[in-house]
Amino acid sequence: MVAFTLLHVALSLIGIGAGFAVLWGFLTAKRLNAATAIFLTTTVLTSVTGFLFPIERFTPGHAVGILSLLALGVAVVARYPMRMAGRWRTIYVVAAVISQYFNFAVLVIQSFQKAPVLRALAPTHVELVTQLIALAIFIVLAAVSIIRFRPESVPEPEMAAVQS
């Protein structure tokens, strides 16, 4: 179980890192195809592996996992089969940011539960304040990303070769 937990945590951290790269791409109007693939793949795997731990009861973590998988499903469809055409661009950005927020929120929650220094702060409502600040930041990131990320102006690498 220790090795499985380490795999789950590694997938989560890779997904969070790649997710922030994708968010940077949104803000700078860059597709970052490799980071996107890593983000979507590792974040799906993080959510799926979360359900493979022994389950005694349904927890808020399970609810977040389900919501994350739903958002990831929408993001994958919007990004790949729908190619972010028209409104699918906005749908993709929102679904990707929601997915990243869920992954990051679980990191914050787990950090407050597992790290002794942070656990000592939890009764003082620091965790709740931290979560609210993170949520506000992600809402702002989503709004700015919707405005700035215009993939129509940045051709796909394979399309650029065809157009040359």
Image: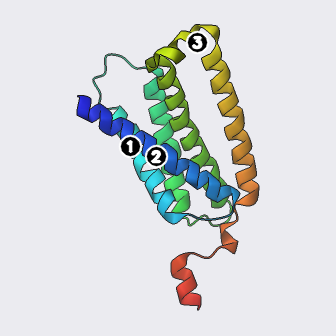
- Judged from the image, the secondary structure of the residue bearing numbered disc 3 is helix
| Residue at 54% over, 88% down | 162
State which quadrant residue 56 falls in: top left
Does the residue at mark 2 contact the one at mark 1 (Cβ under 8 Å)? yes
Residue carrying label 3: 121
| Residue at 51% over, 16% down | 117
- Judged from the image, the secondary structure of the residue bearing numbered disc 2 is helix
Position above or below: 4 against 72: above
Residue 124 tag number: none
State which quadrant residue 100 falls in: top right
| Residue at 70% over, 45% down | 141
- How far apart marks 3 and 2 lie (CA) works out to 27 Å
**Of the residues shown, which amino acid type is indicated by label 1?**
Leu
Residue carrying label 2: 15
| Residue at 27% over, 23% down | 54
**Of the residues shown, which amino acid type is indicated by label 2?**
Gly
Position above or below: 160 against 121: below
Q: Which colour scheme is used?
A: rainbow
Residue carrying label 1: 11
Closer to the eye: label 3 or 2: 3
- How far apart marks 1 and 3 lie (CA) works out to 27 Å
Residue at the front extreme of this rendering: 117
